[in-house]
């Protein structure tokens, strides 16, 4: 469990509530209801906390069969980017490259799970680019 969260004097009260809803909670106890109410917390986590809670985000959505969670859209949007790592922003570069190749593969499996739904929550092209971004990250680890 991460020891640091990104707490700042600049945070609004609702942002602080979002982050604090995860404080001291193991990733395995994350729920869909918590993610729906506090989905913006992922933007305030330190890189370590972000990576720590990803398995909880993925498993809560899968366990509760909730692909439409707003946090899922946020994560796909983060991953939907150019294949040129030089164009990646600092927020992304501080978090996603920390994943191991196995964690990238697990995230790709989560994207495939999202692709299995035909409700239109995600565009196929966006999910495809997200999958490809993870493949770049996975391959970069090998280099």
Image (cartoon, helix red, strand yellow):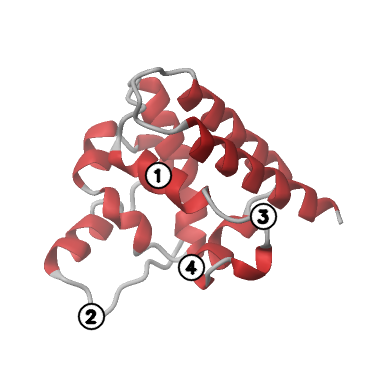
How far is disc 3 from disc 2 in space, using C-alphas?
A: 33 Å
For marks 3 and 4 on the same chain, the one whose residue lies earlier in the sequence: 3
Which residue lies under the disc numbered 2?
A: 10
Foreground pick, 131 / 1: 131
Q: Nearer the viewer, mark 1 or mark 2?
A: 2
Q: Does residue 23 appear anywhere in the picture? A: no
Q: Nearer the viewer, mark 1 or mark 4?
A: 4
Which residue lies under the disc numbered 3?
A: 83
Residue 13 spot, x, y in % from top left? 13, 67
For marks 4 and 2 on the same chain, the one whose residue lies earlier in the sequence: 2
Screen quadrant of the C terminus: bottom right
How far is disc 1 from disc 3 in space, using C-alphas?
A: 33 Å
Which residue lies under the disc numbered 4?
A: 91
For marks 1 and 2 on the same chain, the one whose residue lies earlier in the sequence: 2
Where disc 3 sits, the SS reads loop
Q: Give the crowd class for mark 2: few <14, some 14-19, many >=20 residues within 10 Å.
A: few
Q: Does residue 93 appear anywhere in the picture? A: yes
């Amino acid at each position: 469990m991460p020891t640091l969260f990104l707490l700042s004097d600049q945070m609004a009260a609702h942002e602080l509530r979002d982050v604090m809803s995860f404080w001291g909670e193991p990733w395995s106890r994350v729920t869909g209801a918590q993610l729906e109410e506090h989905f913006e917390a992922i933007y305030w986590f330190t890189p370590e906390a972000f990576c720590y809670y990803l398995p909880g985000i993925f498993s809560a959505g899968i366990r509760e069969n909730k692909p439409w969670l707003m946090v899922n859209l946020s994560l796909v949007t983060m991953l939907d980017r150019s294949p040129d790592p030089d164009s990646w922003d600092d927020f992304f570069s501080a978090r996603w490259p920390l994943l191991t190749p196995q964690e990238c593969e697990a995230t790709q499996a989560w994207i495939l799970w999202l692709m299995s739904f035909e409700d239109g929550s995600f565009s196929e092209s966006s999910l495809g680019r997200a999958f490809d971004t993870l493949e770049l990250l996975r391959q970069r680890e090998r280099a």
